[in-house]
Amino acid sequence: MIRIDDIELIDRFIHEELSPLEKKNFEQRVRDDREFSKEVRKHIEAIRTVRSYSSIRFMETLEQQMPDWKSGGYKSYSPSIDTTKIMLRIFIPALILGISYGIFKIVQPSEHQPPAKHEQTVQPTEDTNSTEPAITPGDSSVGKDSTQ
């Protein structure tokens, strides 16, 4: 009678899950132990039979269903998800956001933008009571008589 450990070992051998040393020991045991060798052959034959039966059963099922498929006509596979609609639902809002952001950046003045040339800025002078505007670079009134 075969032990559960031996069945597991045979399964691991069939599925190529043994280490090189385990495989070597397994093969040596098959050569040396006649009963174990018989059990290994039985196990392998059982697996082949099940696989064969599964394949045959699958083919029979296909053959039974083939007339139904042929009578209904062959219909090509079409996915249930329309990728074009999904892409448009993603692309259009992204495009709108991109355009809106671009317009916003063009319209909004930069924080580091120098004042316009026609503006005159008032800067405090050493005389804190003076309210005269200071002359700044780009001031068009520099060098002109203010009485004119």
Image: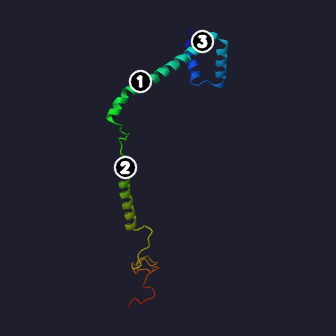
Dot 1 amino acid type: Glu
Question: Judging from the image, what secondary structure is the residue with disc 2 in?
Answer: helix
Left/right placement of residue 85 relative to residue 125 reads left
Total labels drawn: 3
Separation of residues labelled 1 and 2 (CA atoms): 39 Å
Relative to 61, residue 40 above or below: above
For marks 1 and 2 on the same chain, the one whose residue lies earlier in the sequence: 1
The quarter in which the C terminus is drawn is bottom left
Circle number at residue 38: 3
At horizontal 41% and vertical 80% (from top left) the residue drawn is 133
Circle number at residue 60: 1
At horizontal 40% and vertical 27% (from top left) the residue drawn is 63
Q: Residues within 10 Å of mark 3 (few under 14, many from 20)?
A: few
At horizontal 34% and vertical 49% (from top left) the residue drawn is 85
What scheme was used to colour the molecule?
Answer: rainbow
Determine the image quadrant of residue 82: top left
Relative to 83, residue 109 above or below: below
Residue 92 in view in this figure: yes
Q: Nearer the viewer, residue 18 or 96?
A: 18
Of discs 2 and 3, which sits in the foreground?
A: 3
Of discs 1 and 2, which sits in the foreground?
A: 1
Q: Nearer the viewer, residue 2 or 94?
A: 2
Left/right placement of residue 68 relative to residue 21 reads left
Determine the image quadrant of residue 76: top left
- Residue bearing the label numbered 2: 84
Position in image of residue 145 (x %, y %): 42, 90
Q: Nearer the viewer, residue 49 or 32?
A: 49
The quarter in which the N terminus is drawn is top right
Question: Judging from the image, what secondary structure is the residue with disc 1 in?
Answer: helix
